[in-house]
Amino acid sequence: MPMRTDLAVEARELCTDAPGVVCQEEQRGDTHISRIRVENEQGERALQKPCGNYVTVEFSSLTGCSFFPDSRYDAVSQELLRLLPAEGMVLVAGLGNSSITPDALGPRTARQVLATRHITGELRRSAGMEGLRPAAVIAPGVLGQTGIEVLELLTALCGRLRPAAVVVVDAMASRRLSRLGCTVQISDAGISPGAGVGNDRPAINRKGLGVPVLSVGVPTVVEAATLARDLAGEDDAAERAVSPRGEQMIVTPKEIDLLIDRASRLLALSLNHALQPDFDPVELLSLC
C-alpha cells in the first residue's frame, strides 16, 4: 500500500527519480520555502500529482509558541500573491466538516476571511475603503451534510459570480507527524477533497470550474498505516497492527483544537493580506 500524503514535497522525498519535476528551495529566516513545479505527464506519474505549482512553507509549530503576525504569515501571504491573479473578484471556499475538529480548518478559516463583494458605492467611500478588492466567502459543508457535491456548488457560483479565481482551503494529510501544524501547502493545480483520508470527491480545478483554482491547506492528520510504514519500513505486520479489521485509522495531535485555531488564523491573515495588501490584516480580521 502506498504512503498517503497530500504534500508534494513529501511525494518528492519518496521519489528517487522524478523527470518533469523542477524544485527550488529558499530559506527566509526561520521559514523554509520549497517550490515544486510538475511540468508534464512524466512528472505527474512520478509524483502522482497533476501538473502545476506546489509551494510548501515550513516553520516552527503553531502549537509550540504564541502566534502573532510574523514571518510565517508574511511568507504565506507573499506566496499567495505570486499565484493569485492581480485583479478581479476572488471566491474563497472553506472546505470540510466543521463538526469534526481535524477537518474544520476550511470552515474556521472562511469565518475569518473578510467578504467585500457587497461593499460598493457610497458605503465603500464613506468607510474609506475605495481600494478594497471584491471577495466572496463560502463554507459549503460536505456531501453528507448537504447532499450536494462541493464541485456542484462551486460550479454554480462561478457561473453566477464569474470570479477571477477560486481559493479553496482544506485540511490535509501528511506522512509524518513532524509536519502537522507547521506546514502550509499552496498550489494552483486544484484539489481533490477528502483524498488525504481515502474519501476522494470530484476534483476542484481550473478544468472543472473554468477559472484559476488555488488550494491552500495545513496537514492536520496522518493515516496510521502510512505512519507505520514510515517508522517500520515495509513491515506488513506493523500496518495490520494499526488497521484492526482492515479499518482505516487516522492519527491527529492531542492539541488539535489549538492547532486548528492558530492555523485558521494564520491562513485567514495571509488571505486577507494577499487580497487586500493595502490594508492592515489584523484590522481586517477584526471586521470579520
Image: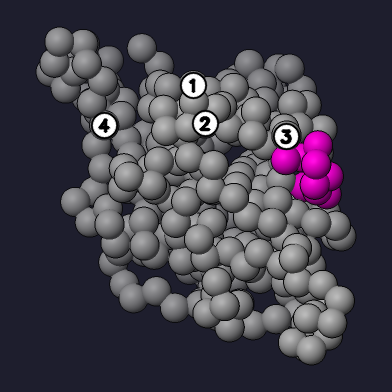
Please tell me whether residue 251 belongs to the stretch shown in magenta: no
Residue type indicated by callout 1: Asp
Q: CA distance from mark 1 to mark 4?
A: 16 Å
- State how far apart marks 2 and 3 are (Cα): 18 Å
- Which residue is pictured at 67% across the width and 37% down the height? 154
Mark 3 packing: few (<14 Cα in 10 Å), some, or many (20+)?
Answer: few
Image marks 1 and 2: residues in contact by CB distance under 8 Å:
yes
Q: Secondary structure at mark 3?
A: helix
Question: CA gap, disc 2 to disc 4?
Answer: 16 Å
With respect to residue 8, does 148 lie above or below?
above
Q: Quadrant of the C terminus?
A: bottom right
Q: In the rendered image, is residue 28 in sight?
A: no
Residue type at mark 3: give it: Ala
* Residue under label 1: 200
Q: x, y (%) of residue 219? A: 41, 44
Please tell me which residue lies in front, 245 or 28.
Answer: 245
Q: Which residue is mark 4?
A: 250
Question: What's the amino acid at mark 4?
Answer: Ile
Where 229 falls versus 105 (above or below)?
A: above
